[in-house]
Amino acid sequence: AQKVTQAQTEISVVEKEDVTLDCVYETRDTTYYLFWYKQPPSGELVFLIRRNSFDEQNEISGRYSWNFQKSTSSFNFTITASQVVDSAVYFCALSELNTGTASKLTFGTGTRLQVTL
Amino acid sequence: GAGVSQTPSNKVTEKGKYVELRCDPISGHTALYWYRQSLGQGPEFLIYFQGTGAADDSGLPNDRFFAVRPEGSVSTLKIQRTERGDSAVYLCASSLRSDRGRADTQYFGPGTRLTVL
């Protein structure tokens, strides 16, 4: 069965600090996708990134970067020079393609990030 | 273009009543998903449609929950004999398609907050 674990319930940082949000997943499938979504106080889930299981290259988008390591089943998310606008709950999610329903997302419980001045 | 829209944004009802929640997906998206998010948790899958048919309804908690998508666009989630435990935010998402071996990105609506008194 698929499972996503976000062990950090809440993280508080001061603006301009770097912060890493951890995500560990479990799957028996060899083909899967991993996602990160942001849920600001307004409540709407905002898509950040999608990564397939065959592409372990790290990705950088502005202040955001993602580290995918199949050996440790982790897909961690780092925000560099955090800003107050980064304050939100961040969810990691998994989609199995061969054994599960295609595109059904299994979410972690989320990490609440609080960035203060 | 317009994103996923959901109505109403808030719904308060009494225990035992019937409710309908509506989702209007992004134009051109053939796959539609319903999730339920309880306080402090990640979204949990309920049902997914590819076109007009429910391809996977394994996440529906019981037979009080039902969803339709008669013309392959707008979907309605129906809950009969509501219970206090049904209180949650109901999220709808859509993607271009959803086939085995493919996981297009899901884009979420703002959700409907259901409160059962």
Image: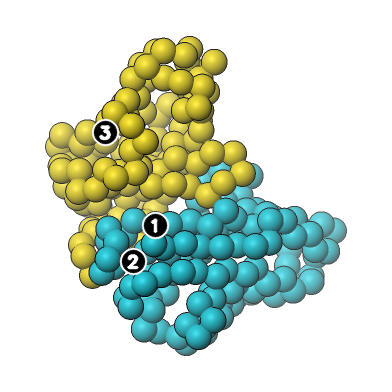
Chain colours: A cyan, B yellow
Residue at left offset 14%, top offset 37%: B71
Amino acid carrying mark 2 in the image:
Glu
In this image, A115 relative to B22: left or right? right
Query: Splitting the image into 4 quarters, where does residue A103 fall?
Result: bottom left
- Relative to B112, say whether A60 is above or below: below
Q: Residues within 10 Å of mark 2 (few under 14, many from 20)?
A: many
Residue at left offset 46%, top offset 69%: A26
Q: Chain of mark 2?
A: A
Instruction: Give the foreground label among 2 and 3.
Output: 2
Amino acid carrying mark 1 in the image:
Leu
What percent of the width, then of the height, locates residue B53? 15, 43
What percent of the width, then of the height, locates residue B9? 47, 29
Residue contact at pointers 3 and 1, CB within 8 angstroms = no
Residue at left offset 33%, top offset 32%: B62
Q: What is the secondary structure assignment of the residue under circle 2?
A: strand
Query: Splitting the image into 4 quarters, where does residue B117 fall?
Result: top right
Q: Where residue B67 is drawn, which disc sits there?
A: 3
The mark tally for this picture is 3
Q: Which residue occupies the foreground of this view, A79 or B78? A: B78
- Relative to B114, say whether A52 is above or below: below
Q: Which residue occupies the foreground of this view, B32 or A28? A: A28
State which quarter of the image contains the N terminus of chain A.
bottom left
Amino acid carrying mark 3 in the image:
Ala
In this image, A46 relative to A102: left or right? right
For label 2, the residue is A96
State which quarter of the image contains the C terminus of chain A.
bottom right
Q: What is the secondary structure assignment of the residue under circle 3?
A: strand
For label 1, the residue is A105
Q: Residues within 10 Å of mark 1 (few under 14, many from 20)?
A: many
Instruction: Find the distance from the CA under tag 1 to the CA under tag 2.
Output: 8 Å
